[in-house]
Amino acid sequence: MKSGCYIGVMSGTSMDGVDVILATISDKVVKQEVSYNHPFPQEIKQELLSICQGQQTTLSIVGRLDYELGTLFAESVQGLLDKAGLTANDITAIGCHGQTVWHEPDGKKPFTMQIGDNNRVAALTNITTVGDFRRRDMAYGGQGAPLVPAFHMAVLGHPAERRIILNIGGIANISALLPDTAVKGYDTGPGNMLMDAWIWRHKQLPYDKDALWASEGTVNEPLLQKMLSDPYLARTAPKSTGREYFNMTWLEKQLADYPNVEPVDVQATLAELTAVSISQQVILSGGCDRLLVCGGGARNPLVMSRLSALLPNAEVATTDKYGLSGDDMEALAFAWLAFRTMSGLSGNLPSVTGADRETILGAIYPVVR
């Protein structure tokens, strides 16, 4: 086993910051040590948004963003090291997910693309870096996502309790950890992404803090039902999605038949869409005793209260209550996946992704010291 100190780097679909986590990891123990959030430059975010929803772009633009993101991730790692008072020599490896710009697992020739040059991350930090986690799973017929359920099972699985771990990032995904049952996990649909995009359009705010705006509105039931009829939400797992599907173009198509809905009511309806689409999938997955929530959406009191109301037989709580920071969960997962890769261990769960075998994930970018 390649036990040691690992760093996980995750920027996520929302691009609201780069989450960086330091963890001590061995075969049986994952101990979260220090976390750090590095600002995500608005100009890079806007450029990424201009290419990751199917717009035309050029190789020059993609290559430059790959370079800039590699630099950004390296700066984020250095920020964590400075905060922790550590040097590169203290770290075994970095697990860097990269920024997804396109995810198409169901096409005739499935692929996924994350950018953020890991060669630069390794060179600028002088730390061995593990990246490109998703494509090996896809090479064996899987969706390449979600990968976090394997980590959830390792750190939050319970022999008797029926637990579902819910991550509400830009996209929401669940990990069903049910005793004596193979782990299931998939993207349920929109998380924060549409709410964030809508409030940015109307108020130039990156997100609806404490759901204050959505709480002023009223859910438009016909609009909600139209949104809930989207074919993706009815698909069976394994399945995964992203910004290339649920984006402002998608929302504008939903709104076309409802031109007079007030913006504040659209925000309220989007919050309800997130809560209802998640709760439906929790029920379809077999239900649970505890729904443990992580990601930025765990801090949305409206979504959390609606989940409690829609799932009256489950305790709805944040993962923080069970010892793992909801803000750091995904970055911590990729630190763990880097440990698995460095140890020559598989990182995917075929019951989740649909791959035909377990496999070691990722590519290793080594450094010589």
Image (spheres, rainbow, N blue to C red):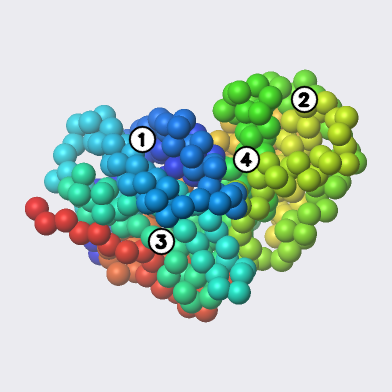
Label 2's element? helix
Disc 2 from disc 3: Cα separation: 39 Å
Left or right, 230 with respect to 166, comes to right
Alpha-carbon span between mark 2 and mark 4: 16 Å
Measured as percent of width and height from the top left, residue 35 is found at: 36, 35
Would you name the residue on which mark 1 appears?
35
Q: Earlier in the sequence, mark 3 or mark 1?
A: 1
* Residue under the image location 62 percent in, 56 percent down: 241
Q: Give the quadrant of residue 21.
A: top left
**Where, quadrant-wise, is the N terminus in this rendering?**
bottom left
Secondary structure beneath dot 4 equals helix
Q: Amino acid at mark 4?
A: Met
Tag in front: 2 or 1: 2
| Kind of residue at disc 2 | Val
Q: Is residue 203 above or below residue 18?
A: above
Question: First in sequence: mark 2 or mark 1?
Answer: 1
Residue in the foreground of this view, choosing between 339 and 321 = 339
**Mark seen at residue 193:** 4
309 vs 196, nearest the viewer: 196
User: Which of the two marks, 4 or 1, is nearer to us in this view?
Assistant: 4
Query: In this orientation, does residue 331 appear?
Result: no
Decide if residue 247 is on the left or right side of residue 156: right
Residue type, label 3: Phe
In front: label 2 or label 3: 2
Residue of label 2:
264
Q: In terms of sequence position, does the residue under pointer 2 or pointer 4 come before the other? A: 4
How far separated are the C-alphas under marks 3 and 1? 22 Å
| Other-residue count near label 4 (Cα within 10 Å), few / some / many at <14 / 14–19 / ≥20 | many
Q: CA distance from mark 3 to mark 4?
A: 23 Å
Determine the residue positioned at 77% across, 59% down.
Answer: 231
The residue shown at (61%, 23%) is 204
How many neighbours does mark 1 have within 10 angstroms: few (below 14), some (14-19), or many (20 or more)?
A: many
